[in-house]
Amino acid sequence: MAAFISGFDEQNKRISTQLLLQKIYAALDQGETEFEILASGHHDIGGPLWTKDGKPLKFTVKNPGQRVGAFGLTGTEIVVEGPAPADVGWLNAGATLTLKGDGGDTTGHCSASGKIYVGGRAGTRTGSLMKHDPSHEPPELWILKNTGSFSFEFMGGGIAVVCGYDSEEFESVLGDRSCVGMVGGSIYVRGPVKGLTKFVWQLDLDEADQKFLQDNMPVFLEKIGRPQLLAEFTDFSQWKKIVAMSREECERSERITVREFRTGKWVEGGIFGDVVEDDYDRVANFVNQGDDRLRIPHWQNKLFGAPCQTACPTGIPTQDRINLLRQGKIKEALELVLTYSPFPASVCGQVCPNLCKDACSRQFVDHPVAMQELGRLSQDVSPPEKKPETGKKVAVIGGGPGGLSAAWQLSLLGHSVTVFESDKEVGGKLRQAIPMERLPREILDSEVDRIKSMGAEIKTSQKIDTKTFKKLQKEYDALVIATGAHNPVVIPFPGHERLVKGLEFLKSINNGENPRVGRKVVVIGAGNAGMDVALGAYAMGAEKVTAIDVQRPAAYQKEIDHFTALGGEIQWPAFTERVDEDGLHTKDGKLIEADMVIIAIGERPDLSYVPREWLTVRGMMDANECWQSKLEEKVFAIGDTIKPGLLTHAIASGREVAEYIDAYLNGWELIPKQKPIMIPQEKLSRELFMPQNRGRFRVIDAKNEASRCISCGTCRDCSMCLETCPEGAIVRTEKEDGTVEYHSEDKYCIGCGICVGICPCGVWAMEKVIL
């Protein structure tokens, strides 16, 4: 049964459009999908609306105001029991609209998808600016009778059908001056047509045209309640098809000025020639070119960083990777990420919290681009070509993600690299602390093998002491300290000797030792490490796991959600008083029963082999902005030896330190890297992108994701600026390296700013000229 929503209050007084729409939203939240709406000129009924689970919506509306079905989405059906005023189906994006009466001015204006059925006449500028995105079905606009003047103005795509019923009194069923500026789409028309622009063709229907009308006409007539007209409307001798001429077919030699068009071709005497003299000379001086412009457009490709790139600690330019996919350069796209990280599948594809995804601009349209899936695709990609051997030797102390990242980048730069790892295998916390369910070992092993294939020598079970460190200083041209943090932080409250160290606990699980945890476990620390430990406790058979913290949990929400879904509980703020055989006692007198208490509040690096004066007061390496020791120029330090961080921070520091070491070994000045400035969201034209499946989202393939990426701050070579510039001032140039470049010709540009407004990526900007 449909939910009834009235546009009147209990006193039968009309309520505002805002209140009516709020009623609809509230009913949607309660799970309603069918609506019967009694309106009284209320605007914007029917779109853009959707349900979380993707169920279709149906609206039956009486007495709507303007813009019924505007921005309507796929899965929405709207039936208007009578006529509707202006802007019916404005910017329709997939909805099906049926009017059992006339449509007002600009019916179907800017439709991009979906179907609109009008059971009467349609007003001025009906069908103007209809368009077709080839990735979706074309929009359709069906009209029983006739249209007003200027119909299908600047039509760029889609299909219109004007049946000309009960229109004998009109000289043209399309009104006056229809199809001006039409460049695409098809119009099927029955009845007389006059006053068409000369840049369109009127054609007889071929077999395909007749089949289209034969197949779809019954649906239209059924929708508007006129099935008895089918035989009359399928006499195809009465029909014509209107299509735009191609560029080649248009007579370019007769191109006229804007002034001539406005005063002589569009409406005689100018737009308002019937009511006022249009003195064009009075405004002509304000439309200038060249040095006389008040605003100048600039193509600012890559001036700003995309949100994904600036949020990623490693700085991976996902927008560049996706642009390559869009161009069909699959191999180049998958290889690109390897110049930033040797762990695209292990980290980006499996364990990274995906800060890039959290920042993705696409989330404001529907949902972020699937970065993880793109990372996984790079697992088996061959390594890029390395530079010639330099003869320089670099020692990397630590074979975790930071150290291996540095070794990878240094190898690519042509240096000879040796990695010294204290454990039996390299990988650091990727191997030791990440549960195998989150990071399958075969993925990590394949990426470690790729690092080895670049020539880096890896020595395991290498314990570094003061003597060994001094020897490395003498034998190598540069050293990287990348040992990570493995010494657990323990607070010396009573009973601290009972605690199990979180990192040791995770190591024992990954080593297959299956530690016994008992029925109840308490984890001190609710950060990401604490959540890993808590999930590990459940994996080992715990029935109840409680995590406590002195502050709001620092773990990422998806980690917390996973933990609580298993029955876990987080208590904060909670301060530990002591630990005994009963469990953990908090300072407010509460006992949390536990068979095992695990502490996971962080680790510190073991830097006992370096001189004490090299360290900060907190026991971390004291380095400058280029990761270089302040007291020994050939020694560099990265990752958790400088500051605790994520795996991606360690990988990023490994990449950066390789560039600084390369500069140091070549005798160049070390200049701190500057992160790109994130592009402001207001520079993007997100409205040009159609939402896709707002309900259950499932990644289809990399090609699909490439089409969804907005390419923030980086030109996607869509040519929209080129195609829409009214003066033809935009020029596209292909360079020798395969890239493209756009610029605006000063002698043609009038500074209108259309290029800025139409650019989906925010690449164009207007500079005001100071007079």
Image (cartoon, rainbow, N blue to C red):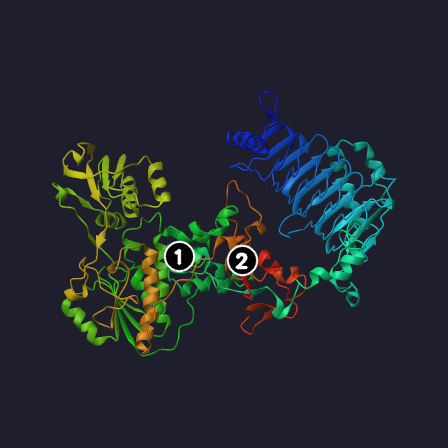
For label 1, the crowd category at 10 Å Cα-Cα, with few meaning under 14, some 14 to 19 and many 20 or more, is many
Residue found at the far left of this picture = 494
For label 2, the crowd category at 10 Å Cα-Cα, with few meaning under 14, some 14 to 19 and many 20 or more, is many
Counting labels gives 2
Instruction: State the separation of the CA atoms marked 2 and 1.
Output: 19 Å
Residue at the spot x=20%, y=35% of the render? 594
Q: Secondary structure at mark 1?
A: loop
| Residue located beneath label 2 in the image | 761
Cβ–Cβ below 8 Å for labels 2 and 1? no
* Quarter in which the N terminus is drawn: top right
Residue 345 visible in the shown view? yes
Q: Is residue 170 above or below residue 420?
A: above
201 left or right of 109?
A: right
| Residue 530 placement (x, y as % from top left) | 27, 45
Give the amino acid at mark 2.
Cys
Give the amino acid at mark 1.
Cys
| Residue located beneath label 1 in the image | 312
Q: Quadrant of residue 639?
A: bottom left
| Residue 292 placement (x, y as % from top left) | 62, 68
Q: Secondary structure at mark 2?
A: loop
Q: Quadrant of residue 443?
A: bottom left
204 left or right of 95?
A: right
Q: Earlier in the sequence, mark 2 or mark 1?
A: 1
| Residue 177 placement (x, y as % from top left) | 80, 51
| Residue 533 placement (x, y as % from top left) | 27, 44
Q: Nearer the viewer, residue 422 or 730?
A: 730
Residue 199 visible in the shown view? no
Q: Is residue 303 above or below residue 188?
A: below
* Quarter in which the C terminus is drawn: bottom right
